[in-house]
């Protein structure tokens, strides 16, 4: 019960403040005009005695001139000759008469009926503006209700490349915020336009109305002139962008042809095509931006140049490591130590290369772990690539296992068991044939190493598992034990 009452009170106060805001220009104009009227009335009261006194002076001078003319016998006097101050007095009279006429005209303009007509027009404008603003708020409210009622039926989540950026609820909230800001913006514009219109109805505030309209019209005029002056440079920028776009399309086409093997360039490997295209793309875009820069509006201003220098300094100070990784990525690209899909060992991590760019390299281990290496670290580390031994022109990757067997077992028997175990292991090549190396002769046993070839590098952990199983099976079936005897000399005590 309390919440609806508070909402109603807030709504009434909001409407009251809106009306008060619109009435403020009327009260201000009324006060200014009343003050101006009082000043003009005071000026009129000061002028009238002066005008009466001047007319009396002129009448006296005219009468005196007539008597003088009669005394000397002059009978035809059409107009009195002015004395030395009569010209000045005549000009003063004319000026005062003009002032009086202007005061009379102002009084006619400021008469009570015309003033109340303008006051009524101002109140009508305020009432219409309040109605129009209320109508806009009502329409925005109905629109918000329809958006909330639509829900997930008509409003879907926002995706960017199959990645959900905003859920349906978040999209609805964002639309409501945008509509609310738009409502307040329209209301502010209407109020800002209404105030100068009301000021223009009253003579005392017409100058202020022109000033307020200038706040709107002058920026719009400057923007319009700026756009017109920018049109020639805009055509140049568009032409440069179009040329860059088509050059990049040609480079992309050549890259695809090289990757597919349709275009062969001596000494240029297919895996160089994509990184070379990316490097060329960055350089070409940077070159285009450098050409376009002088044609941008405000590029010659100190503020624009200062911002450019500031951004350059921040980029230089904060991206030294990033630039190092970028350069290292370019070097690694043309070194070709591995490619996507290769099984490699970097530092102590072994896995498959799933991503290689100009900044980092990512490996996916056999445990589905993703390990990220900066290119600077890779450039200063040794890399083992297991796939280079499994190419078509190579024999394959050699995997090996070691066992120790006592000297009581003939080495020929151990060799046969190990080779048979390797040949029966899945994914092990029959050709070249597996072989055994005897790596150590210890005090109590000999160390044997079975070596076999495989090209299924991605299945190395499974191959090792099956090889160990087959070795155990072979020794068990032969009645031999993989454990080696250890001897200790015990001296009997006398």
Image (cartoon, helix red, strand yellow):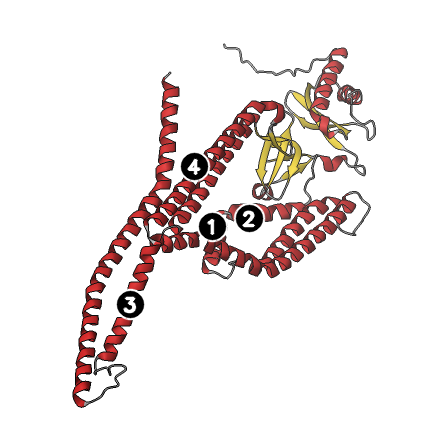
CA distance for labels 2 and 3: 85 Å
Q: Marks 1 and 4: which is nearer the front?
A: 4
Q: Position of residue 33 (x, y in %)?
A: 30, 51
> How many residues crowd around disc 1 within 10 Å: few (fewer than 14), some, or many (20 or more)?
few
Q: In the rendered image, which residue does mark 3 sit on?
A: 97
Q: How crowded is mark 4: few (under 14 residues within 10 Å), some or many (20 or more)?
A: some
Query: Disc 1 or disc 2, which is closer to the eye?
Result: 1
Where residue 466 sits, quadrant-wise, is top right
Question: Mark 3 to mark 1: distance in Å?
Answer: 74 Å
Can residue 421 be spotted in the picture?
A: yes
Query: Residue beneath label 4, please?
Result: 130
Which picture quadrant has residue 90? bottom left
Residue at mark 2 to residue at mark 4: CA–CA distance = 60 Å
Q: Name the residue under label 1.
A: 314
**Nearer-N-terminus badge (2/3):** 3
Where, quadrant-wise, is the N terminus in this rendering?
top left
Judged from the image, the secondary structure of the residue bearing numbered disc 2 is helix
> Mark 1 and mark 4: span between their CA atoms?
51 Å
Q: How many labels does the image show?
A: 4
């Amino acid at each position: 019960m309390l919440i609806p009452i508070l909402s109603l009170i807030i709504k009434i106060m909001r409407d009251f403040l809106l009306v008060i805001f619109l009435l403020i220009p009327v009260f201000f104009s009324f006060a200014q005009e009343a003050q101006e009227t009082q000043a003009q009335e005071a000026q009129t009261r000061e002028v009238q005695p002066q005008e009466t006194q001047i007319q009396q002076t002129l009448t006296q001078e005219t009468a005196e001139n007539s008597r003088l003319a009669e005394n000397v016998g002059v009978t035809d006097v059409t107009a009195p000759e002015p004395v030395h101050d009569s010209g000045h007095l005549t000009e003063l009279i004319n000026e005062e008469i003009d002032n009086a006429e202007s005061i009379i005209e102002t009084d006619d303009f400021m008469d009570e009926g015309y003033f109340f007509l303008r006051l009524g027009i101002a109140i009508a404008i305020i009432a219409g503006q309040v109605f129009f603003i209320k109508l806009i708020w009502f329409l925005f409210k109905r629109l918000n209700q329809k958006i909330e009622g639509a829900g997930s039926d008509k409003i879907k989540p926002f995706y960017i490349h199959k990645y959900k950026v905003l859920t349906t609820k978040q999209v609805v909230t964002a639309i409501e915020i945008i509509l609310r800001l738009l409502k307040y913006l329209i209301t502010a514009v209407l109020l800002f336009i209404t105030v100068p219109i009301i000021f223009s109805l009253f003579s005392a505030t017409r100058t202020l109305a022109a000033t307020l309209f200038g706040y709107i019209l002058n920026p719009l005029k400057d923007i319009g002139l700026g756009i017109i002056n920018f049109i020639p440079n805009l055509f140049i920028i568009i032409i440069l962008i179009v040329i860059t776009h088509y050059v990049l399309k040609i480079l992309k086409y050549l890259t695809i042809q090289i990757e597919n093997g349709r275009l062969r360039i001596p000494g240029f490997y297919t895996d160089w095509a994509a990184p070379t295209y990316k490097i060329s793309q960055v350089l070409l875009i940077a070159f285009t931006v450098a050409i376009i820069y002088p044609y941008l509006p405000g590029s010659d201003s100190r503020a624009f140049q200062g911002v450019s220098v500031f951004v350059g300094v921040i980029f230089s100070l904060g991206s030294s490591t990033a630039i190092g990784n970028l350069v290292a990525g370019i070097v690694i690209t043309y070194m070709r130590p591995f490619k996507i899909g290769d099984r490699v060992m970097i530092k102590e991590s072994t896995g498959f290369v799933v991503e290689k760019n100009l900044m980092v390299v990512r490996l996916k281990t056999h445990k589905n772990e993703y390990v990220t290496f900066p290119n600077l670290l890779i450039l200063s580390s040794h890399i083992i690539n297991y796939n280079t031994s499994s190419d078509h022109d190579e024999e394959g990757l050699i995997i090996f296992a070691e066992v120790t067997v006592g000297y009581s077992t003939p080495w020929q028997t151990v060799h046969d068991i190990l080779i048979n175990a390797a040949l029966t292991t899945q994914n092990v090549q029959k050709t070249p044939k597996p072989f055994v190396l005897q790596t150590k002769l210890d005090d109590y046993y000999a160390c044997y190493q079975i070596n076999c070839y495989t090209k299924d590098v991605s299945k190395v952990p499974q191959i090792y598992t099956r090889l160990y199983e087959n070795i155990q099976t072979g020794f068990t079936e032969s009645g031999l034990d993989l454990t080696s005897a250890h001897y200790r000399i015990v001296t009997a005590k006398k």
